[in-house]
Amino acid sequence: MTRTSVNGVEAHPTNLDRLAAFLRPLQKGPFARADFECLTARSSENGDLLLDTARVMKAFGLGTGPDQWALLHQAEVTDDIVAYLSSVLGPADLILGMELPTPLFLALKKAGYRVMDFGISPIRFTPELTFEIRSTDADLYRHIGDYALPDATILRAVTSLSGLARRDAQNGPRIAELGRVGVIFGQTALDTSLIQGEGMFDMRMAEDQIRSWAAPLDTVLYKTHPFHEDLQTPQFLQDVCGKVQVTTFPTYQLLSYDNVTDALAISSGTLIEATYFGVRPQALMTPPRWKAREFHHLAVTSDLLSPASIMRLLGAGEDEICPDKGPDLRLSFGGWGDQEKVIVFQCRSVASLARSRRARRIRAFVKKYLAGAIVSLIAAYFLLGRV
């Protein structure tokens, strides 16, 4: 509701659409319940309830714009925002949010609402994609805990991926040649997990910390985020560490090797995953979203959103046709992981990466303008031939 054009920040409305879709069986079809109603609150006219972005920002004592959006995630709850949310949302038995800014989550709690705030769990290497959820009270926490991902499932995924990493027998020796390895995981340029002050945290703010982390390592591997091609960060890291290689090798297979001992990122959830593989994590900052976690579950199956679960949360009676099975989150949200690939391990220097990028740009330039020139010459030839 605040990540909108009003604040100059790209919106992700599909997350709310997915949550609403997961509850659709309770509204239509053979599992529908006459005593269930689901309303969506949006920052546009497309929802059932309108939460005006500018009004929300004003209630926190802020203006609009990317810098104000960043400050919102660190703001204090005001009486104005509590009153505004109450006036718009009215009576509600349960509120579901998707990665709500922490101050909004706390404002909803202060207004007396029962809230479950969803996000994709940082444990993404299991067969099923799961939710990370924070809630507002002990009763919700206990109910959510009934759907927590069992430790046995996590253990099985770790050992399976460690075995998968050995399917190509040549990869082990190749990685062993690098000595003691630390992996730095890149992140996207704009994300709530990077918010600090009026903007986004940048690795250049932690040069001494990175240098100290890399000192005992023989090799530093940098893995760029799949949705953010970044050449500047590897070059910066090379200048700081002097031993950086860039790789696209699958994350979980990489973390499975014994000589990969350390992992670093600004705040990536991959650091949480690294601990399950016995790799030491180091985060450069703590994002605002990691606050307000008194009632927090790290990995919860989607069965929490099953018709039976939702009706129990609402205090309604169950019936025989109310199933206790939720959606397939990998089907709904996409892959979220590269654990199933089996490829040959490769890494390259930062300098070769820069040369390759320049070569691609030159080829694209030549292809674009040379093709135009050839078309012009052909057209001129036929025109002259007619004269």
Image: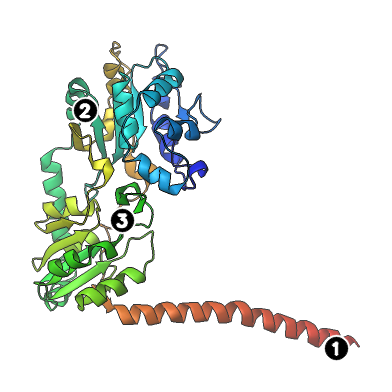
- Of label 2 and label 1, which has the lower sequence position? 2
Q: Counting residues from the N terminus, which is met first, the one under dot 2 or under dot 3?
A: 2
Q: Which residue is mark 1?
A: 384
Q: Could you say which is closer to the camera, residue 164 or residue 219?
A: 219
Residue drawn at the location 42% of the way across and 38% of the way down: 62
Give the residue type at disc 2. Ile
The kind of residue tagged 1 is Leu
Q: Position of residue 18 (x, y in %)?
A: 41, 36
What kind of residue is marked 3?
Answer: Phe
At mark 3, the secondary structure is loop
Q: Which residue is mark 3?
A: 201
The residue shown at (27%, 62%) is 205
* Furthest residue in direction front, as rendered: 61
Compared with 296, 220 (above or below) is below
User: In terms of sequence position, does the residue under pointer 1 or pointer 3 come before the other?
Assistant: 3
Q: Nearer the viewer, residue 251 or 104?
A: 104
Category of crowding for the residue at label 3, using alpha-carbon neighbours closer than 10 angstroms: few (below 14), some (14–19), many (at least 20)? many
Image quadrant containing the N terminus: top left
- Give the quarter of the figure containing the C terminus: bottom right
| Scheme of colours in the image | rainbow
Residues under numbered marks 2 and 1 in contact, where contact means CB atoms less than 8 Å apart: no
From the viewer's perspective, is 333 left or right of 294? right
Please name which of the two marks, 2 or 3, marks the residue nearer to the observer: 3
- CB atoms at circles 1 and 3 under 8 Å apart? no
Residue 213 on image: x %, y %: 13, 66
**Residue position for label 2:** 144
**In which quarter of the view is residue 244 placed?**
bottom left
Residue 26 in the image: above or below residue 270? above
Please tell me how crowded label 2 is: few (under 14), some (14-19), or many (20+) other residues with Cα within 10 Å.
Answer: many
Q: Is residue 244 visible?
A: yes
